Amino acid sequence: MRPPGSAQALEVRRMIAVRTSSSVVRWKQALQSGGEEALKAKPHPGRRPKLSQSQKEVLEQILLQGPQAVGFSSQLWTWRE
């Protein structure tokens, strides 16, 4: 009996399952060679911020003042006139 789903959906499901099983093998090997420490999450710093700390502080002050303080006609930042 064929599982439910289109041929494309089944293909995607199979590709995910293959990656998952290979991940499990890799994790098991890591556990055996490095113990539980090898399985702990490693931080990913992500992209560097585009704003400096001082720019973030200025932005925070602008946001706290509210939309009307910087020229918007209402208390909504997204108001279209």
Image (tube, grey):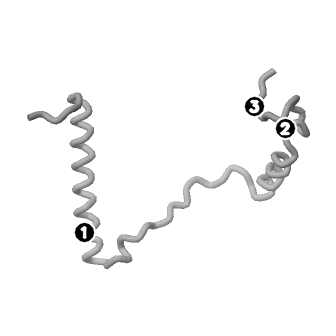
Which disc is residue 28 wearing?
Answer: 1
Q: Mark 1: few, some, or many residues within 10 Å (few <14, many ≥20)?
A: some
Determine whether 28 is above or below 63 in the image: below
Determine whether 49 is above or below 7 in the image: below
The residue indicated by pointer 3 is 78
Sequence-wise, which precedes: disc 1 or disc 2?
Answer: 1
Question: Residue, x 81% and y 20% (percent of image)?
Answer: 81
Of marks 3 and 1, the one in the foreground: 3
Specify the amino acid type for callout 1.
Answer: Lys
Specify the amino acid type for callout 3.
Answer: Thr
Determine whether 38 is above or below 53 in the image: below
What distance separates the C-alpha of mark 3 from that of mark 2?
Answer: 9 Å
The residue indicated by pointer 2 is 67
Looking at this view, name the residue that lies furthest to the top. 81
Determine whether 32 is above or below 66 in the image: below
What distance separates the C-alpha of mark 1 from that of mark 2?
Answer: 54 Å
Question: Residue, x 22% and y 49% (percent of image)?
Answer: 18
Q: Are marks 1 and 2 in contact (CB under 8 Å)?
A: no
Dot 3: element: loop
Q: Mark 3: few, some, or many residues within 10 Å (few <14, many ≥20)?
A: few
Dot 2: element: helix
Of marks 1 and 2, the one in the foreground: 2
